[in-house]
Image: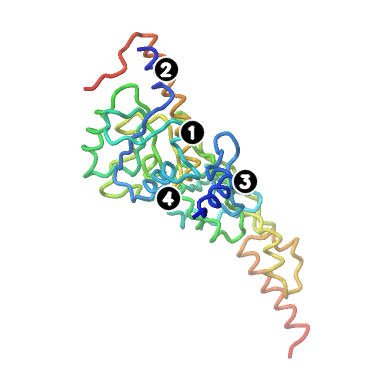
Amino acid sequence: MSFLNNIATKSPWLFRINAGSCNGCDVELATTAFIPRFDVERLGCKYCGSPRHADIVLITGPLTLKIKDQVLKVWNEIPEPKVTVAVGICPISGGVFKGGHSIEGPIDRYLPVDVNVPGCPPRPQAIMEGILLAKEIWLKRIEEAERKGVRHVQIS
Amino acid sequence: MFKFLKVLVKNILQGPATEAFPLQPAKTPDRFRGRVTLNPDLCVGCGICSHVCSGDAIRIIPNEEKTGYHYTVWYNSCCLCGSCTYYCPTKAITMTNNWHNSHKQDDKFKMAEHHFIPYLKCDGCGAPIRLLPPHLATRIYAHSPVDIEKIIRLCPSCRQIATAERQGELNESNPE
């Protein structure tokens, strides 16, 4: 099992949640992974389709009223230890949508955010910096969990 | 038939398309719109930047004693549109090409630039003013014979009076 753990800690899997984003940051997230010039996958990161496989969750968008419950539901499905990264200024502060009638954000009212990547949208390289920061935090959390003897996968 | 060999050799010589970013600094264009920065010497506190700011990132608040104002830019709300640099009359606020903005949640509210900018006193009436930047004054008064050193230390209404006096003197000396 430790062999598997050693391999797994090299590559955190990413999951994207769109919390009412204008799609700009989502395009940058796709660019970060799929354009060979940036290529986040050489850092061992990979986008996955299911929240239950994810380690690092990237949230874009200001958290609109309509999508709030779904975002929280999906976020709760991601197993611990997870790291939440807010991409773009919208989830961090509300950005240009701040004070709108349908905006529930900033997102740290509802979720514990770990890393912020401001920008409108942020550069792919800036997103990669954020992912590297998140990876550091994630490795620390795994170590802590191992010390305490907690099982990694805990799906509620 | 051997066209592919040509492509192969070309690709080998070209090297990978991937940037070695986390290991080496990424290439950034000079005019890249990164975080904004303020030159407090040039700022006159007109407030057009906070008026046009689409992300509501700029805040200008005078202090209680009215001896100056606090100028704050919060990068976490700045959408990098560049409206502030476009509309700033003295070009005090500019954009750098620094995009290294990723930070941990603990530093969320430290991601800001803050300046306390003191007021000067008008030489005429003592009202709190900011100095008119000399490079702007030389442009405004390019065709009039005024002492720029003196006129930039006046508030707008005192400047108006000074202009009227100057005009009056001119009219008296040359009645036609």
Q: Image height check: is A149 above or below A50?
A: above
For badge 4, the amino acid type reads Gly
Q: Nearer the viewer, mark 1 or mark 4?
A: 1
Residue B67 can be seen in this image? no
- Image coordinates for residue A80, horizontal then vertical, percent: 31, 22
Label 4 belongs to which residue?
B55
Q: Secondary structure at mark 4?
A: loop
Q: Which residue is mark 2?
A: A6
Mark 4 vs 2: CB contact within 8 A? no
Q: Residue under label 1, please give it.
A: B103
Q: Position of residue B25 (x, y in %)?
A: 60, 39
Give how far apart the Cα atoms at labels 2 and 1 are: 27 Å
What residue is at 38 percent from the left and 34 percent from the top? A46
Check the image and report above or below for B86 versus A150: below
Q: Residue A1 occupies which quadrant of the picture? A: top left
One can see residue A146 in this view? yes
* Chain letter belonging to callout 2: A
Label 1 is placed on what type of residue?
A: His
Under circle 2, the secondary element is helix
Q: Quote the CA–CA distance across marks 1 and 3.
A: 31 Å
Q: Say whether marks 2 and 3 touch (CB < 8 Å).
A: no
Q: Residue furthest front?
A: B1
Q: Which residue is mark 3?
A: B118
Secondary-structure class at tag 3 = strand
Q: Secondary structure at mark 1?
A: strand
Please give left or right for residue B121 compared with residue A48 in the image: right
Discs 4/2, front: 2
Does the CB distance between marks 2 and 1 fall below 8 Å?
Answer: no
